[in-house]
Image (cartoon, rainbow, N blue to C red):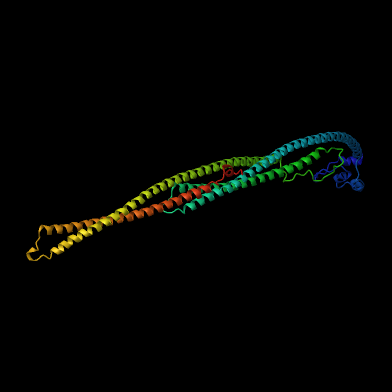
């Protein structure tokens, strides 16, 4: 056995400390040799960095194995690479076909929404035109109410020129006030309806513009997707675009994309229905307004007719009483003349009786007697004075009656003139002016 083999098989001295195991190299043998071995000390410097023969063979075997493993791995990688290339080619083709199909589906979705938006835009445009026509009717109807209102106010002002006692708050005036109030209320209603129509037209146009913007975006997106659907591997206008596959935070999702157009269509359809309902409401308002105005106009005209008949009847009755009063005045004047003549006729008998009494008062002495003649003359004077008193009282009464008849005549003539003036105002002024009252079609805003 060689010395090196002996040294390799020697155990460490009992007093040495056990150290951790190191790779099997020659310097481990030198370190594990006893401290008093002279041969280990002499060859230590030649064996510290050299491998053993077994280790050399092991190293060769390791190289063989490594080369075989590398070749095997390379062959496997080549096979896997070919398989991967084929798989990725098939995957890329399937992915491109799926992407093309998805782009085609997206085109169909976009075309569907685009068609719906275009239909809604056309309907909104047509509805807005119809509402504009209704707004024009409202404005014409509002202008048409100016004439009835001026007629009603003019009638009221004309009837203010009536004289007492005809200046009364009769049913004609009540109907005219009702007509003026009705026209003012209708004018306020028409103004509010016009403002509502203007606001609805603005909303229609706003949502139409929103749908048009959405439709324009979808047209642009449709054109882009249509261009994308025509790209293929042999296209010459394709190139690399770095960072194009990065998703932006502001990108929409299919749900939000569909919800956006659905909301636009919903709001537009809601406004279109509101506009249609408003148009129907305007039709009802104009129809009811024109009918109410014409009914009130007929009521006022009927009241004027009745009032004119009453005035004519009152005027005829006043004229009849005036004729009777004039005849009575003539009779009373004759009566007064007769009374005056009767009073004048009593003066001569009274003078005769008083003269007789005066002459008989000069009878001398005892002849101044209260005889029957004296008593009769005294009673005659008293009777004549009483008759004169009664006649004068009756004359005063007749004159007062004549004065009353004259006052009545003047009052009747004045009242007849007042009735004639009132009749002229109601018939010649008011009713003639009301002949220009607008027609139902004009009040409904068609003319």
Which residue extends farthest left?
366
Q: Which residue occupies the foreground of this view, 331 or 246?
A: 331
Task: Please report the residue visible at 65 percent of the width from the left and 40 percent of the height from the top.
Answer: 269
Give coordinates of residue 290: x percent, y percent.
Answer: 55, 43
Q: Which residue occupies the foreground of this view, 322 or 197?
A: 322
Q: Which residue occupies the foreground of this view, 328 or 137?
A: 328
Quadrant assignment, res 133: top right
Q: Disc count in the image? A: 0
Above-or-below relation of 306 to 102: below
Question: Is any part of residue 166 visible from this angle?
Answer: no
Give coordinates of residue 425: x percent, y percent.
Answer: 48, 51
Give coordinates of residue 207: x percent, y percent.
Answer: 67, 44
Which quarter of the rendered picture does the N terminus lie within? top right
Task: Please report the residue visible at 81 percent of the width from the left and 36 percent of the height from the top.
Answer: 96
Left or right of 249 in this view: 82: right
Above-or-below relation of 301 to 342: above
Left or right of 57 in this view: 378: left
Quadrant assignment, res 12: top right
Q: Which residue occupies the foreground of this view, 269 or 237?
A: 269
Give coordinates of residue 433: x percent, y percent.
Answer: 53, 49
Which quarter of the rendered picture does the C terminus lie within? top right
Question: Is any part of residue 407 visible from this angle?
Answer: yes
């Amino acid at each position: 056995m060689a010395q090196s083999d002996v040294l390799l098989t020697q155990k460490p001295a009992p007093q040495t400390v056990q150290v951790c195991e190191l790779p099997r190299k020659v310097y481990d043998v030198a370190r594990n040799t006893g401290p008093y071995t002279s041969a280990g000390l002499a060859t230590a410097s030649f064996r510290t960095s050299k491998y053993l023969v077994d280790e050399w063979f092991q190293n060769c075997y390791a190289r063989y194995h490594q080369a075989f493993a590398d070749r095997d791995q390379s062959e496997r990688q080549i096979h896997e690479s070919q398989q991967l290339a084929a798989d990725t080619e098939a995957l890329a083709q399937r992915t491109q076909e799926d992407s093309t199909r998805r782009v085609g589906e997206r085109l169909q979705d976009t075309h569907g929404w685009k068609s719906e938006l275009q239909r809604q835009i056309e309907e909104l445009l047509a509805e807005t035109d119809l509402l504009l026509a209704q707004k024009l009717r409202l404005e014409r109807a509002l202008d048409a109410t100016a004439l009835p209102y001026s007629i009603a106010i003019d009638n009221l002002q004309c009837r203010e020129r009536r004289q007492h006692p005809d200046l009364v708050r009769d049913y004609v005036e009540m109907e005219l006030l009702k007509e003026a109030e009705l026209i003012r209320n209708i004018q306020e209603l028409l103004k509010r309806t016009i403002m509502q129509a203007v606001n609805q037209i603005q909303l229609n146009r706003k949502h139409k513009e929103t749908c048009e913007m959405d439709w324009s975006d979808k047209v642009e997106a449709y054109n882009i997707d249509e261009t994308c659907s025509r790209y293929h591997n042999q296209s010459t206008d394709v190139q690399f675009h770095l960072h194009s596959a990065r998703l932006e935070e502001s990108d929409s999702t299919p749900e939000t994309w569909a919800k956006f157009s659905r909301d636009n269509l919903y709001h537009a359809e809601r406004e279109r229905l509101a506009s249609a309902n408003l148009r129907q409401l305007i039709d009802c308002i104009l129809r009811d307004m024109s009918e109410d105005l014409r009914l009130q106009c007929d009521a006022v005209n009927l009241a004027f007719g009745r009032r004119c008949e009453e005035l004519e009847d009152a005027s005829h009755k006043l004229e009849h009483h005036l004729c009777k009063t004039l005849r009575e005045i003539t009779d009373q004047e004759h009566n007064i003349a007769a009374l005056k003549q009767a009073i004048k006729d009593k003066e001569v008998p009274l003078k005769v009786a008083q003269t007789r009494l005066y002459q008989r008062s000069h009878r001398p002495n005892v002849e101044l007697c209260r005889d029957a003649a004296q008593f009769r003359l005294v009673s005659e004077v008293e009777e004549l004075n009483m008759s004169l008193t009664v006649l004068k009282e009756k004359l005063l009464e007749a004159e007062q009656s004549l004065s009353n008849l004259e006052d009545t005549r003047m009052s009747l003539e004045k009242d007849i003139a007042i009735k004639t003036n009132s009749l002229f105002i109601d018939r010649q002024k008011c009713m003639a002016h009301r002949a220009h009252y607008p027609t139902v079609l004009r009040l409904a805003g068609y003319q």
